[in-house]
């Protein structure tokens, strides 16, 4: 009777503690800004199956993916067992397996297999953490405590079932080969010893289960509860990862906890601390203060420490709890290149870029506290329609002696060639623009340009937090484009591509935009472009972040290269979706890089590792950054070219 009362007291207290913690966690979410991730429920459910249950992203690391898969599915099947032990302990005459009939036996068979599989998963996880120790994995008491909880649950379960088989010979015994095998260890034990082991294992299992239940909300493994929701409510349009700033509001951006949306707070809860986000993060790799995992975890810990009144902003908070400048240093806020490696790598779809840009919006719009170098770009975009602050009248200088028409002169189904600021003003990119014009003319594409009517898309302004400037540029460009009724927009700049195609949706536009390499791939497939000359070169290819991870196109450039006779491609280790940023994105092109190793140097060293004498790119910012690194590292023998320049060469007669 004493045992029964003790179990009731322990269970009630444990569940009450868990409910109190859960109420606090949910209550914090409800204080966040509204979010609307409720559309396309079928697609969202499919994602839950694919990414949460089948754990597709985790298997990018096959070792970790395998053992995590074992542990996850073990929990799915064994969760019932934990509650079964508690219920049967609280109500001694109950027998849930008997109630389930033959299905109870089937459950025992599955459970018996998964106990062993989970123990295998725990063993592999310990091997990885103790002996293999990948650089991204950080050992912690939290991690080892979690593995200990899981191991104890499995072992106590195995001891309990094995001794139960010897004590009462239940019907399900013939369905559990591993428990039967393990029971042979106790075959010579006395009945009283078996009962003692059985009772002890039962209590250890219950106490471990209830202890683990209350440990989880305070550990990184809180994602056991939140991951399914985070995957379901994920951003379905991953390229659209910046929140539009309400310019009519009295407050801009993110400076305090309840400026985050509830979904962004859910991100904090869901981090597994696996470190995948930092493996290819350019700021992490070059010793910048911004580390995506640390950023999210610091804000999670802050959220845990705050009262409801503090989260709501009803009471003044201590300086130590100030987000901007304290929890998130200014250098971290301005370090991000918005390359999205962290978001692509995260197995649970945690977003970082919208949060960082939200901080920038606050600093830029409310405090006018942004890096001084950005002022040149802001003034140039506002006055001359380009961040170089060069005369608008010079925007067409690149087109001298070229067969190119204004879009108003083009009839029928017409394509708009969006030149972009770099393509119009920057010397190396003028060559790329001229190459693209020659390619389009070769394929008889019916296209035109806007000339001096074209202005900067505002990519830099938005990503540096200046939504006022971005909105003005967006509205102006949208109005200009719409009046010409174009069928498709072609651009050689992935940043222009993303801004025109994705960001402008916030301002009512829905343009069909394609990158030049994607368009050229289609022209080759249709037989409208035929290469006449081989290019006997060994090249490597640097995938731009805004083409590979934002647009999701890593195949078009490779299709083109494989179509050019004699051209040999040497892939970098970090290529395609895993490509390392050149360091220019997120407006970083215009800011000084004063901390750690220069990102473009880091990336260029990876190019050198391939042994190729030519690095091909398909982004004007990547072109400039890598070409600068070539000179700064005294590697003048290495060429940096846009892939369009190679295409033009291959189209020429022998």
Image: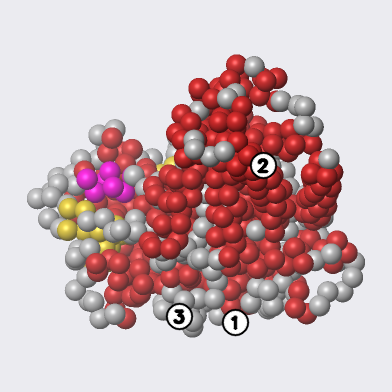
Q: Which residue is mark 3?
A: 596
Q: Position of residue 280 (x, y in %)?
A: 43, 62
Residue 259, placed above or below residue 94: below
Q: Is residue 558 magenta?
A: yes
Q: Give the number of the disc on residue 372.
A: 1
> In this view of the protein, can residue 242 be seen by the observer?
no
3 or 1: tag closer to the N-terminus: 1
Q: Is 559 left or right of 309, judged from the image as shown? A: left
Q: Residues within 10 Å of mark 3 (few under 14, many from 20)?
A: few
Furthest residue in direction left, as rendered: 654
Screen quadrant of the N terminus: top right
Provide the secondary structure element on which disc 3 rests. Answer: loop
Q: Residues within 10 Å of mark 2 (few under 14, many from 20)?
A: some
310 or 514: nearer the eye?
310
Q: Position of residue 318 (x, y in %)?
A: 81, 77
> In this view of the protein, can residue 24 be seen by the observer?
yes
Furthest residue in direction top, as rendered: 102
Marks 2/3: CA–CA distance: 59 Å
Q: Position of residue 11 (x, y in %)?
A: 79, 45
Residue 511, placed above or below residue 288: above
Q: Residues within 10 Å of mark 1 (few under 14, many from 20)?
A: few
Residue 331, placed above or below residue 409: below
2 or 263: nearer the eye?
2
Q: Which residue is mark 2?
A: 199
Identify the residue shown where x is 68% and y is 74%. Answer: 327
Provide the secondary structure element on which disc 1 rests. Answer: loop
> Which portion, as a residue range, is magenta?
556-562
2 or 1: tag closer to the N-terminus: 2
Q: Position of residue 273 (x, y in %)?
A: 56, 59
Marks 3/1: CA–CA distance: 20 Å
Q: Is 161 left or right of 625, judged from the image as shown? A: right
């Amino acid at each position: 009777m004493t045992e029964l009362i003790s179990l009731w007291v322990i269970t009630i207290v444990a569940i009450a503690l868990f409910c109190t913690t859960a109420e606090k966690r949910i209550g914090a979410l409800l204080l966040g800004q509204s979010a609307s991730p409720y559309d396309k429920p079928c697609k969202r459910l499919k994602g839950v199956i694919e990414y949460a249950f089948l754990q597709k992203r985790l298997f990018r690391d096959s070792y970790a993916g395998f053992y995590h898969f074992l542990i996850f599915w073990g929990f799915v099947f064994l969760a019932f067992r934990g509650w079964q032990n508690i219920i049967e302990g609280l109500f001694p005459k109950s027998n849930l397996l008997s109630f389930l009939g033959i299905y109870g036996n089937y459950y025992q068979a599955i459970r018996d297999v998964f106990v062993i599989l989970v123990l295998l998963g725990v063993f592999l996880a310990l091997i990885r953490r103790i002996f293999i120790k990948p650089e991204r994995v950080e050992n912690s008491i939290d991690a080892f405590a979690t593995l200990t909880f899981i191991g104890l649950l499995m072992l106590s379960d195995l001891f309990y079932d094995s001794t139960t088989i010897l004590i009462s010979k239940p019907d399900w015994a013939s369905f559990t080969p591993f428990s039967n095998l393990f029971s042979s260890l106790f075959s010579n034990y006395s009945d009283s010893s078996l009962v003692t082991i059985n009772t002890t294992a039962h209590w250890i299992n219950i106490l471990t289960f209830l202890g683990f239940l209350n440990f989880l909300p305070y550990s990184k493994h809180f994602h056991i509860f939140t991951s399914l929701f985070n995957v379901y409510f994920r951003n379905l349009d991953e390229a659209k990862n910046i929140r539009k700033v309400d310019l009519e509001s009295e407050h801009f951006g993110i400076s305090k906890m309840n400026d985050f949306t509830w979904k962004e707070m859910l991100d904090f809860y869901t981090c597994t601390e696996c470190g995948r986000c930092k493996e290819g993060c350019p700021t992490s790799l070059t010793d910048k203060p911004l580390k995506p995992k640390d950023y999210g975890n610091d804000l999670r810990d802050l959220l845990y420490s705050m009262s409801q009144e503090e989260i709501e902003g009803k009471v003044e908070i201590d300086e130590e709890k100030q987000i901007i400048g304290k929890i998130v240093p200014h250098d971290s806020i301005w370090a991000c290149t918005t390359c999205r490696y962290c978001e692509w790598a995260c197995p649970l779809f945690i977003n970082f870029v919208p949060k960082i840009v939200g901080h920038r919006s606050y600093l830029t719009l409310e405090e006018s506290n942004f890096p001084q170098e950005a002022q040149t770009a802001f003034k140039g975009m506002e006055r001359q329609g380009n961040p170089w602050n060069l005369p608008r009248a010079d925007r067409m200088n690149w087109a001298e002696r070229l067969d190119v028409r204004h879009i108003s002169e083009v009839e029928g189904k017409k394509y708009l060639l969006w030149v972009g600021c770099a393509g119009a003003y920057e010397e190396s990119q003028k060559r790329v623009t001229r190459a693209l014009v020659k390619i389009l003319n070769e394929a008889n594409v019916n296209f035109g340009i806007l000339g001096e009517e074209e202005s900067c898309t505002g990519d830099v302004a938005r990503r540096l937090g200046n939504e006022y400037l971005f909105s003005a540029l967006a509205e102006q460009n949208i109005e200009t484009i719409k009046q010409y009724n174009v069928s498709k927009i072609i651009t050689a700049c992935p940043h222009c591509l993303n801004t025109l195609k994705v960001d402008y949706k916030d301002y009512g536009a829905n343009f069909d935009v394609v990158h030049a390499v994607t368009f050229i791939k289609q022209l080759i497939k249709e037989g409208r472009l035929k290469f006449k000359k081989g290019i006997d070169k060994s090249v490597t290819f640097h995938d731009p972040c805004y083409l590979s991870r934002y647009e999701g196109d890593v195949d078009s450039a490779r299709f083109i290269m494989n179509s050019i006779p004699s051209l040999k491609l040497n892939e970098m280790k970090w290529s395609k979706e895993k490509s390392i940023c050149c360091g220019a994105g997120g407006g970083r092109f215009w800011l000084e890089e004063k901390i750690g190793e220069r990102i473009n140097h880091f990336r260029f060293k990876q190019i050198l590792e391939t042994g190729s004498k030519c690095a091909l790119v398909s982004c004007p910012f990547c072109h400039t950054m890598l070409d600068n690194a070539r000179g700064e590292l005294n590697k003048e023998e290495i060429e940096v070219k846009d892939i369009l320049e190679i295409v033009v060469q291959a189209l020429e007669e022998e």
